[in-house]
DNA sequence: TTATATTTGATAATATTTGACAAGTCAAAA
DNA sequence: TTTTGACTTGTCAAATATTATCAAATATAA
């Protein structure tokens, strides 16, 4: 399954009629990398999220949430007890 | 904060009056490593979970859940939007 | 002190991720 | 049907990150 993050940033880019070739250099990467990120075979680095949000003129928080969810999903998919583990983490986090 | 997983396996080991020196070789590691795992400066490999559950005579599922929760917590702690991301992942997972 | 258990730190060994580039596909225009 | 432009894919070396190993330090109890 395609990642939500990759799908989202591709949509944003296309909506704005930007080419990979235009966006990639702004993130200091080549088009191949950005393509892979959109197709979810590579991860965007966290520190590139903010620049990307600016380039795509969208909310950082939204992109960040999708990005983080992808990381977590990657970790827990195909794992038994995933739901229990997630629930436990939510509880732990709320305590702070 | 000490991880739940590390705390748990230490408790189990101590309850059974086992020394690191006794348990570590059963997992093909040295005591220093196991000590670090209990103190959470190093992660147990997933494939070592089942052997460890047997050694400590405890439920695999319980250990696995704690272990997985620790991995996820590591990823999302100190991240904004962590709760939203977790919620989203739970939803995604339930669909399968 | 001595003996035993655990912890810590340094660094070597491994594993993983990334960057860079070449070659590939695909669709549309000429 | 060739050319062009956009994107995709694979490879591989370099950069990073993680883990293993061992020695030394610390702790605890007798």
Image: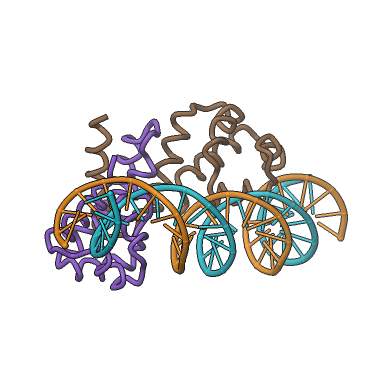
Chain colours: A purple, B brown, C orange, D cyan
Q: Quadrant of the C terminus of chain B?
A: top left
Q: Residue furthest left?
A: A15
Based on the displayed image, in which of its 4 quarters is residue B94 positioned?
top left
Which residue is at 57% across, 36% downward? Answer: B48
Q: Is residue A96 visible?
A: no
Which residue is at 36% across, 63% downward? Answer: A45
Foreground residue, C30 or A39? C30
Which residue is at 23% across, 55% downward? Answer: A65
Q: Position of residue A62 (x, y in %)?
A: 18, 58
Depicted A79 relative to depicted A37: above or below: above
Based on the displayed image, in which of its 4 quarters is residue A19 positioned?
bottom left
Depicted A26 relative to depicted C27: above or below: below
Which residue is at 53% across, 48% downward? Answer: B43
In-image side of A86 versus C8 (left or right): left
In-image side of B5 versus A52 (left or right): right
Q: Position of residue A83 (x, y in %)?
A: 31, 35
Foreground residue, B15 or D21? D21
In-image side of B3 versus A65 (left or right): right
Foreground residue, A93 or B64? B64
Tally the numbered discs. 0
Q: Is residue A41 visible?
A: yes
Q: Quadrant of the N terminus of chain B?
A: bottom left
Q: Position of residue A44 (x, y in %)?
A: 34, 60
Q: Position of residue A22 (x, y in %)?
A: 24, 69
């Amino acid at each position: 399954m395609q990642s939500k993050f990759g799908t989202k940033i591709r949509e944003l880019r296309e909506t704005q009629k930007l080419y990979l070739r235009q966006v990639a250099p702004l993130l200091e990467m080549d088009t191949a990398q950005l393509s892979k990120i959109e197709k979810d075979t590579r991860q965007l680095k966290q520190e590139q999220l903010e620049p990307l949000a600016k380039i795509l003129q969208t909310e950082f928080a939204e992109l960040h949430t999708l990005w983080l969810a992808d990381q977590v999903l990657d970790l827990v998919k195909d794992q038994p007890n995933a739901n229990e583990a997630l629930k436990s983490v939510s509880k732990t986090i709320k305590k702070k």
